[in-house]
Image (cartoon, helix red, strand yellow):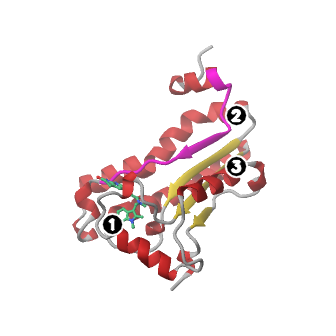
Amino acid sequence: MMTRSPRCANTDRECGGLDVLVHSVAFARKEELAGRYVDTSRDGFRIANEVSAYSLVAVTRPALPLFEKRGGGSIIALTYLGAQRVVPNYNVMGVAKAALEASVRYLAADLGPLGIRVNGISAGPVKTLAARGISGFGSILAHVEERAPLRRNISDSDVGQAALFLASDMSRNITGEVLFVDAGFHIMA
Ligand code: IMJ
C-alpha cells in the first residue's frame, strides 16, 4: 500500500514507521561567511534559509504519517550559538539558525498533540567538514577552551549522547527546547 508520502515509502516499508528524525543540514555560500552581514545578498539569504531552516519543515511534513504509526516520536535539529549571539563570520547562517530555532518551537506546538517532540541541540564548535576552511575557526576553539566554565571543547560523541537523551523517553516532557552542549560557554559574558 502506498503511503501519503511516496518520499518516505522505503522507510515505511523497511522500518514500519519512524521514532526519531535528526535534522543536520546547513549551507550558506562561502562568500556570505566572511565580511559584513550587511553585505548579504538576497539570493545568499534565500539559499541559506531554504537549505538550513525550511528543510526542517520540508522533511518533517512527509514524516508525520510514519511517526503516527508509532504513536509519536522525537525530532532533533542541530543548531549553533550564532542563532542567539553575534559570532564573527557566522553572518547569514546565524539568521538561518534563528529561523530554525523558532521553527523548532512552532513545530513543537503543532506536533505535541501527536506525541511528537521537537528540540534543538546547540553544539559548541567541532572540527568537522562544515568547519573546514572557515577563517578564524582555530581561534574560536581556543577561545572556548579558555572561557567555557568546563575549560574544554566538546566532542562529536557529546552531541551524540545529548541526541540519544532527546530521542529517548528520558526526555518525554521536553519539547520546543534548545539544549546547549557547549561546556557551558553560552552562559558567559
Ligand atoms: C561557520 C561559519 C563561520 C563561523 C563558524 C561556523 N563557527 C562555527 C561554524 C564559529 C562553529 C560551523 N557551524 C556551526 C556551521 O553551522 C557551519 C555551516 C556552514 C559551513 C559552510 C562551509 C562551506 C560552505 N558553506 C557552508 N555553509 C554553512 O561553502
Kindly report the distance in space between the C-alpha atoms of the residues bearing marks 3 and 2.
12 Å
Residue range (magenta): 14-28
Residue that appears at 34% across and 53% down: 48
User: Going by the image, does 156 lie left or right of 74?
Assistant: left
Q: Amino acid at mark 1?
A: Asn
List the residue tagged with mark 3: 112
Query: Is 62 within the magenta?
Result: no
- Of mark 1 and mark 3, the one earlier in the sequence is 1
Q: Earlier in the sequence, mark 2 or mark 1?
A: 2
- Residue behind mark 1: 91
Q: Which mark is residue 68?
A: 2
Local crowd size for mark 3, using a 10 Å CA cut-off: few (<14), some (14–19), many (≥20) = some
Disc 1 beta carbon < 8 A from ligand 1?
yes
Q: Secondary structure at mark 3?
A: helix
Measure the C-alpha gap from mark 1 to mark 3: 32 Å
Residue 119 higher or lower than 150, as above or below: above
Query: Of the residues under marks 3 and 2, which one precedes in the sequence?
Result: 2
Disc 3 within 8 angstroms of ligand 1 (CB) = no
Position of residue 130 measured from the top left corner of the image (x, y, whole percent): 38, 54
Which image quadrant: the N terminus?
top right
